């Protein structure tokens, strides 16, 4: 998968390239709007990460010309300004998603992956990971054949982590997905719930599946 | 029009713009008008009274002669006395009488009449308006009032004679002239006195305004302490001064809030930045193990997240104050909303031994609200309650429908808030217990955000607390 990052801030461009490379993407960087537009018309990219505030040609103009030229590359806008009007303007011009600075890299990665996921995710009936098995139809989870006694929210949380295994999920994303809470709460509500889930899912077993990524969130993974 | 006037006659325009000038002009014009009308009215009354008394005199004379001619047409001596001698006895207001026959031949006349009056003009003038007195200028410059009448002679009448009477009214004319001079003098005096007095009154009247303006000019944002002393002003201006002072109080308070807010922002931004900077600096000072680097980076990331959260909250507050902010209202089941918040915080509360419950309302409450914002407001309140309630305590969420509003209560059995801190808890960055709040990771903006969300909904938040007993925050939202 090829991604173009159009960003004039050198440090931002650098960490985006590094992070996306490590996540398995091929990344090109353009330092201003004109260069970005040139690259997009020359090379086929799957996704363009486009900063709005750019020298020579701003993100809106790049986006407008890109759509005029008929390129169907996905576009993720980055902006420091968070207002409804800006969001609407971006989406009207044909952006596929919108992210406000400062953002968590894990959040960006999650959005990039969900944008690039072709078609809807396969509707699975069971998710398996090591000795963990989640039966989505009957709403029950087992580990090493042993039934896990989970509340409905704990089950949702476990499913979320398992579905997106390997992805670091931020606390905000978890709160939004499991509890439909669309704000950053001051308390460590998500931490408490993950801790409770771990007590049931991981503690009794030698192989740990749920891991804390300090400052970023949680991830479900295991070393094979 | 008036604008071009003032610009063309700039100096006059400036003058006219002063309150003193307007008042002075108003006083002077109305004063002059009053005096003018009064004196002119008196003059007109005097003129008409003088004319009337002269006319009565003339009519009297005509009447006497008419009676004599009718009753005793042959008493020539009597007539002669009446016509020739009566007048001679007078020094002022002399009068002249002439008796003519039908053909205009003079029968008898007061001596000297021909010298004083142009008799031909007399005849011509009185022929036009017989029986009515008119003014006639005499040969020697004196003014006369004259009349004439045709009277029947004898009874029964044999023929008609004509009586002409003229009375010297130059004395009266002089009186009127004197009066006119007085009138002019009074008007002249008025013209001088009224503007001067008016100007003095106006100046005295507007002096407090000028003083206030001087005080107001001294007030700048670095010197908001100055006030206008309300003593010694007339009632109207004293109330203006008091209003002005109240405005200054409010201004001073908001300035203080803003400057405190800026200082707080600076402090709250500085702390995480300082941590990042210091930790990175120390870490780079010499070679470390991978774990040590990981630890430092993790800590830096935590601080950065704290900074992002703070910036996010500040942006939220700034946006909430913008008049362009619109809520995305949709019908929300308030009970269901509280339930979702309760569910979210349930585990955290249980972890520290607090029971988090909800009182059910009799029937579902549906209101047009911005759901994510309301979730955030109630969430902030519950988070606060969890942080400030000791183990074993209780937090209760409740919603009530009132006549045109809904009420949401979040009450706890926590440590409470000291009474002196209570009015300030909705202020940005205000923390009751600085050390504790810092440790709990709050930005100190939670309650400000709650209040902003309420204001956006047209409502308000209220807080009541008893130290050691607990705290209750109530959200009042009018139904739109």
Image: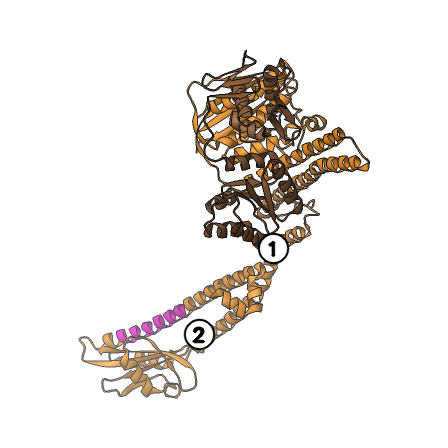
Chain colours: A brown, B orange
Residue depicted at 70% across the width and 44% down the height: B225
In the image, residue B364 sits, relative to residue A62, either above or below, namely above
Of the image marks 1 and 2, the number of the one nearer the N terminus: 2
**Most distant residue in the right direction:** B286
Q: Secondary structure at mark 1?
A: helix
Residue that carries the numbered disc 2 in the rendered image: B172
Q: CA distance from mark 1 to mark 2?
A: 49 Å
What chain letter is assigned to the residue under label 2?
A: B
- Overall secondary structure of the magenta stretch? helix
Question: With A204 as the anchor, is B371 left or right in this view?
Answer: left
* Front-most of residues B66 and A160: A160
Question: With B270 as the anchor, is A132 left or right in this view?
Answer: left
Residue that carries the numbered disc 1 in the rendered image: B206
Residue depicted at 52% across the width and 61% down the height: B26
Is residue B385 shown to the viewer in this render?
Answer: yes
In the image, residue A142 sits, relative to residue B31, either above or below, namely above
**To which quarter of the image does residue B239 belong?**
top right
Please report the bounds of the magenta region as a residue range: B47-67
Quadrant showing the C terminus of chain B: top left
Question: With A145 as the anchor, is B95 left or right in this view?
Answer: left
Which label lies toward us, 1 or 2?
1
* Front-most of residues A7 and B352: A7
Decide: few, some or many residues near mark 2? Use Cα within 10 Å; few <14, some 14-19, many ≥20: some
Q: Position of residue B365 (x, y in %)?
A: 43, 24
Is residue B321 shown to the viewer in this render?
Answer: no
* Front-most of residues A16 and B274: A16
């Amino acid at each position: 998968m090829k991604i173009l990052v159009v960003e004039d801030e050198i440090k931002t461009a650098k960490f985006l390239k590094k992070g996306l490379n490590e996540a398995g993407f091929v990344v090109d960087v353009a330092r201003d709007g004109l260069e970005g537009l040139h690259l997009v018309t020359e090379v086929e990219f799957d996704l363009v990460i486009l900063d709005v505030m750019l020298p020579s040609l701003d993100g809106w103009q790049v986006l407008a010309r890109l759509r005029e030229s008929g390129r169907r590359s996905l576009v993720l806008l980055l902006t420091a300004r968070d207002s409804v009007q800006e969001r609407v303007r971006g989406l009207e011009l044909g952006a596929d998603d919108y992210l406000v600075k400062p953002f968590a890299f894990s959040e960006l990665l999650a959005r990039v992956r969900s944008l690039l996921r072709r078609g809807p995710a396969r509707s699975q009936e069971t998710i398996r990971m090591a000795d963990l098995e989640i039966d989505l139809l009957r709403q029950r989870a087992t580990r090493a054949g042993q039934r896990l006694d989970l509340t409905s929210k704990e089950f949702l949380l476990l499913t979320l982590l398992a579905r997106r295994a390997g992805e670091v999920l931020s606390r905000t994303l978890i709160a939004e997905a499991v509890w439909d809470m669309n704000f950053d709460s001051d308390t460590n509500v998500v931490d408490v719930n993950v801790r409770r889930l771990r007590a049931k899912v991981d503690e009794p077993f030698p192989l740990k599946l749920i891991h804390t990524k300090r400052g970023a969130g949680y991830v479900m993974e295991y070393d094979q | 029009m008036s604008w071009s006037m003032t610009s063309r006659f700039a100096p006059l325009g400036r003058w006219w713009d002063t309150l003193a000038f307007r008042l002075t002009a108003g006083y002077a014009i109305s004063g002059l008008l009053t005096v003018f009308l009064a004196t002119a009215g008196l003059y007109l009354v005097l003129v008409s009274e003088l004319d009337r008394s002269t006319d009565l005199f003339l009519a009297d004379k005509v009447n006497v002669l008419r009676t004599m001619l009718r009753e005793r047409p042959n008493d020539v001596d009597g007539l002669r006395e009446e016509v020739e001698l009566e007048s001679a006895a007078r020094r002022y207001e002399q009068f002249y009488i002439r008796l003519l026959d039908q053909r205009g031949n003079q029968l008898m006349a007061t001596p000297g009449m021909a010298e004083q009056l142009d008799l031909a003009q007399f005849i011509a003038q009185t022929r036009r308006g017989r029986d009515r007195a008119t003014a006639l200028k005499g040969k020697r410059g004196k003014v006369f009032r004259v009349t004439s009448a045709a009277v029947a002679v004898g009874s029964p009448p044999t023929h008609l004679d004509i009586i002409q009477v003229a009375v010297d009214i130059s004395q009266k004319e002089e009186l009127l002239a004197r009066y006119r001079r007085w009138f002019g003098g009074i008007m002249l005096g008025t013209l001088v006195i009224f503007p001067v007095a008016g100007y003095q009154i106006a100046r005295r009247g507007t002096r407090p305004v000028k003083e206030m303006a001087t005080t107001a000019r001294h007030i700048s944002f670095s010197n908001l302490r100055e006030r206008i002393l309300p003593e010694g002003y007339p009632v109207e201006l004293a109330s203006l001064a008091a209003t002005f002072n109240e405005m200054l109080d409010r201004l001073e308070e908001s300035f203080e809030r803003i400057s405190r807010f800026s200082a707080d922002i600076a402090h709250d931004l500085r702390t995480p930045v300082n941590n990042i900077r210091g930790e990175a600096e120390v870490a780079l000072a010499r070679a470390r193990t991978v774990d040590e680097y990981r630890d430092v980076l993790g800590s830096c990331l935590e601080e950065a997240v704290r900074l992002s959260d703070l910036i996010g909250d500040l942006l939220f507050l700034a946006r909430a104050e913008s008049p362009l902010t619109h809520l995305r209202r949709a019908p929300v089941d308030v009970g269901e909303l509280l339930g979702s918040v309760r569910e979210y915080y349930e585990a955290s509360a249980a972890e520290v031994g607090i029971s988090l419950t909800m009182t059910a309302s009799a029937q579902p409450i549906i209101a047009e609200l911005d759901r994510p914002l309301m979730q955030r407001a109630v969430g902030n309140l519950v988070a606060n309650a969890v942080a400030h309630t000791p183990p074993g305590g209780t937090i209760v969420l409740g919603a009530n429908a009132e006549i045109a509003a809904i009420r949401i209560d979040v009450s706890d059995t926590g440590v409470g808030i000291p009474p002196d801190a209570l009015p300030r808890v909705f202020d940005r960055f205000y923390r009751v217990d600085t050390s504790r709040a810092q440790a709990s990771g709050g930005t100190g903006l939670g309650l400000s955000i709650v209040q902003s969300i309420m204001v956006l909904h047209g409502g308000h938040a209220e807080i009541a607390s008893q130290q050691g007993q607990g705290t209750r925050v109530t959200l009042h939202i009018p139904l739109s």
